[in-house]
Image (spheres, grey):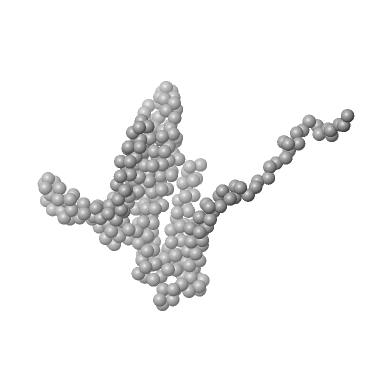
Amino acid sequence: MARTPDNGGADDSATLKPRPGLGPWFSVSPLLLWLSLFVIVPTLLLVVASFCDRSGIGQIVFDFNTDNYARAFQAPYPEIFGRSIWFAFLTTVICLILGYPVGYFIGRSPEKMRNILMMLVMIPFWTSFLIRTYSWISILSEQGLLNGFLLWAQVISEPLEMLYTPGAVILGLVYNYLPFMILPIYGSAEKLDNALVEAAYDLGAGPVRAFSNVIIPLTKPGIVAGVMLVFIPSLGMFAISGLMGGGSQQMIGDVIYKQFSGANNPPFGAALGTLLLLIFAIGLWFSKRKEA
């Protein structure tokens, strides 16, 4: 009888490692192509253009220097960057204060009611962004609905100046980005295990302690996601500050837009855009560090 070689009882099949084929690469190739065409390549072009110069007619001249970045740190651009960060921070905080109770309430509601409540949140966004913004302009103007109502109710004796102020810009940002805070918090609250909350109560925790030590940590991923979804786009927004701020409350998005349009200075606009991307990267790194 032929004997098989003794391998010490080890199974050859266990030592054979399957080699990865091309299937996984084909499955992610659309994503890689999308990222390359619409993220990586435009970002590289933006960075390269930021080190270039411009001709008299606004064309990019490949004369590599750092003059655009030196100009970006001269007045008034640091002030505009600071204002943009401050407005985005206030917007994020207000959206978190308003959006967390709404998102948590929807996530803990009966399943039949969740879709209805989410539809109520999204109904205003079925209309155009410009229509919604101009609606707020008609409400906040001196001859608008709010001043008219307050005058009719004799709450005020003369119209209030509510439009073209920092408060109007913050209001427009909060109104437009509040759903981006509600949605991820709703997703985290929906997955919250009630048994953990009940266990906290059984162990003697009160409502405040259970909320701060159990509910907040369990919904932290939704909070972090909502903060990033609100802070990043509100930092670069330009339409709201232009329409509701009247040009007196410029944000960095307004300046970048003007460099690529009216000022015909794409290299300087690219430098400001690159600095804005750097702020985004720092904010993302900070949020990931907090999440860890």
Q: Residue furthest front?
A: 1
Residue 189 is at least partly visible in this image: yes
- Residue at screen point 63% across, 49% down: 22
**Which one is in front, 13 or 271?**
13
Residue toward you, 28 or 135:
28
Q: Is residue 288 above or below residue 276?
A: above
Q: Nearer the viewer, residue 23 or 178?
A: 23
Residue 136 drawn at (x, y percent): 24, 52
Residue at 37% in and 60% down: 253
Q: Is residue 205 left or right of residue 124?
A: right
**Residue 156 in view:** no
Q: Position of residue 47 (x, y in %)?
A: 49, 64
Q: Residue at x 38, y 46 (%)?
A: 180
Residue 160 drawn at (x, y percent) = 18, 53
> Which residue appears farthest toward the top when viewing the image?
202
Rendered view: 237 above or below 264? above
Q: Is residue 135 left or right of residue 255?
A: left
- With 59 as the anchor, is 33 left or right in this view? right
Picture residue at 48% right of the left edge, 42% below the top: 291
Quadrant assignment, res 216 = top left
On-image quarter of the N terminus: top right
Residue occupying the far bottom of the picture: 56
Q: Is residue 76 above or below residue 27?
A: below
The residue closer to the viewer here, 6 or 100, is: 6
Give above or below for 62 relative to 282. Answer: below
